[in-house]
Image (spheres, rainbow, N blue to C red):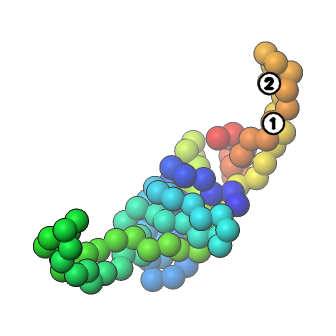
């Protein structure tokens, strides 16, 4: 999965289409992400010791990773993400970096 925690993403499909937010949590096993302020659901909760008030609570529900796209930090546009192999000059080790497909900026 090419979406990581703390990425800024925009929703491209579903009821929340067009909304943007930060990725709070990534569930790799079922390809879902929780995005801040997107896909809000209402949860009815009983009064407990932990939550003495009870009532209706609102929280973000997971959304499928295919329905969001990453916003490039440089060009500030939604774009696909690619990978590029980079050699570290100090150590000489190779590692993969994510790359914006529009502006070729590494992030």
Establish if 7 lies above or below 37.
above
- Sequence order check, earlier mark of 1 and 2: 2
Residue placed furthest toward the front: 49
- Looking at the image, residue 33 sits to the left or right of residue 30; the answer is left
Contact between labelled residues 2 and 1, with CB atoms less than 8 Å apart? yes
Q: Percent x, y for residue 54?
A: 18, 77
Q: CA distance from mark 1 to mark 2?
A: 8 Å
Give the crowd class for mark 2: few <14, some 14-19, many >=20 residues within 10 Å. Answer: few
Circle number at residue 88:
2
Q: Percent x, y for residue 97?
A: 74, 41
Establish if 96 lies above or below 5.
above
Q: Residue at x 49, y 65 (%)?
A: 34
- Looking at the image, residue 64 sits to the left or right of residue 54; the answer is right
Q: Nearer the viewer, residue 83 or 62?
A: 62
Quarter location, residue 78: bottom right
Q: Percent x, y for residue 41?
A: 35, 79
Q: Residue at x 59, y 49 (%)?
A: 72
Total number of numbered labels?
2
Which residue position holds label 1?
95
């Amino acid at each position: 999965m090419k979406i990581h925690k703390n990425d800024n993403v925009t929703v491209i499909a579903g009821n929340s289409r067009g909304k943007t937010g930060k990725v709070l949590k990534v569930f790799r096993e079922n390809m879902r992400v929780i995005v801040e302020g997107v896909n809000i659901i209402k949860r009815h909760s009983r009064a407990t010791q932990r939550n003495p008030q009870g009532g209706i609570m609102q929280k973000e529900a997971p959304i499928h990773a295919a329905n969001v796209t990453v916003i490039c930090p440089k060009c500030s546009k939604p774009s696909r993400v690619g990978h590029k192999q980079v050699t570290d000059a100090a150590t000489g080790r190779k590692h993969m970096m994510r790359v914006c497909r529009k502006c070729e900026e590494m992030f």
